[in-house]
């Protein structure tokens, strides 16, 4: 049976993880800011619960940041950290990084599509980009180009710049539409050069 002391130690470890996640996103905001992008405020999640009967959503099971340029809210960059999802049954925490383009007149201020990009059953079309670790996800109102990283692949500011900021900025600058794969395969391949050795596949995220 777990002891009071062990419970306290687990809680302290949870606090440490939250501080580390906070530091990573603060650093990401700064790096993206140097590239001309602004954020959508300080909110990092939604769908949290403080009620009885929903204990798994008491925990910060995901965090998300979106980045905008030139007040364009229909074409944004995003980073989603997913700690655990019961439907996905992931066995490690991971980052989903990508470009999100709105296909209607609505701006993007939070993205369920980024949360489930590349794996969620509600996404009708998911395709791999040849010669890259990148995926396209085409939903009803959003098209995305994304890739997966393990949380611990980001161990330094240099990692953050080379594995997150640089690929995202290349995607943003090189792709205006996700309608035709042939139009951006080259951009996707160029953007993924830095990440090929450490990007994750869906199977590696869910393997026992």
Image (cartoon, helix red, strand yellow):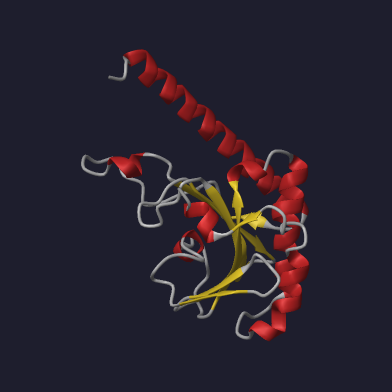
On screen, residue 104 above or below 109: below
Compared across the picture, whether 64 is left or right of 185 comes to: left
Compared across the picture, whether 187 is left or right of 64 comes to: right
Residue positioned 70% across, 58% down in the render: 37
One can see residue 77 in this view: no
Residue extending furthest front?
208
Residue positioned 72% across, 55% down in the render: 197
Q: x, y percentage for residue 135?
A: 59, 69
Q: x, y percentage for residue 171?
A: 71, 68
Q: x, y percentage for residue 19?
A: 55, 32
Quadrant housing the N terminus: top left
Residue extending furthest left?
53
Compared across the picture, whether 75 is left or right of 48 comes to: right
Residue positioned 51% across, 34% down in the render: 18
One can see residue 101 in this view: yes
On screen, residue 52 above or below 114: above
Task: Determine the image quadrant of residue 144.
Answer: bottom right
- Count of residue discs: 0
Which is nearer the eye, 33 or 91?
91
Q: x, y percentage for residue 143?
A: 54, 75
On screen, residue 186 above or below 171: below
């Amino acid at each position: 049976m777990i002891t009071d002391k062990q419970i306290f130690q687990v809680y302290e470890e949870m606090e440490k993880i939250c501080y580390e996640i906070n530091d990573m996103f603060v650093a990401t905001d700064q790096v993206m800011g140097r590239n001309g992008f602004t954020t959508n405020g300080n909110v990092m999640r939604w769908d949290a619960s403080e009620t009885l009967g929903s204990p798994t959503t008491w925990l910060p099971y995901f965090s998300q940041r979106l980045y905008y340029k030139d007040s364009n809210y229909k074409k944004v960059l995003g980073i989603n950290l997913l700690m655990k999802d019961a439907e996905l049954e992931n066995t490690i925490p991971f980052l989903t990084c990508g470009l999100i383009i709105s296909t209607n007149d609505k701006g993007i201020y939070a993205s369920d599509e980024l949360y489930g990009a590349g794996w969620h059953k509600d996404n009708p079309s998911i395709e791999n980009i040849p010669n890259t670790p990148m995926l396209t996800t085409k939903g009803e109102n959003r098209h995305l180009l994304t890739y997966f990283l393990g949380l611990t692949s980001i161990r330094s500011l240099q990692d953050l710049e080379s594995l997150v900021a640089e690929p995202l900025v290349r995607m943003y600058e090189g792709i205006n539409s996700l309608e035709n794969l042939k139009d951006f395969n080259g951009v996707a391949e160029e953007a993924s050069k830095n990440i090929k050795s450490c990007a994750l596949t869906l199977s590696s995220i869910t393997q026992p």
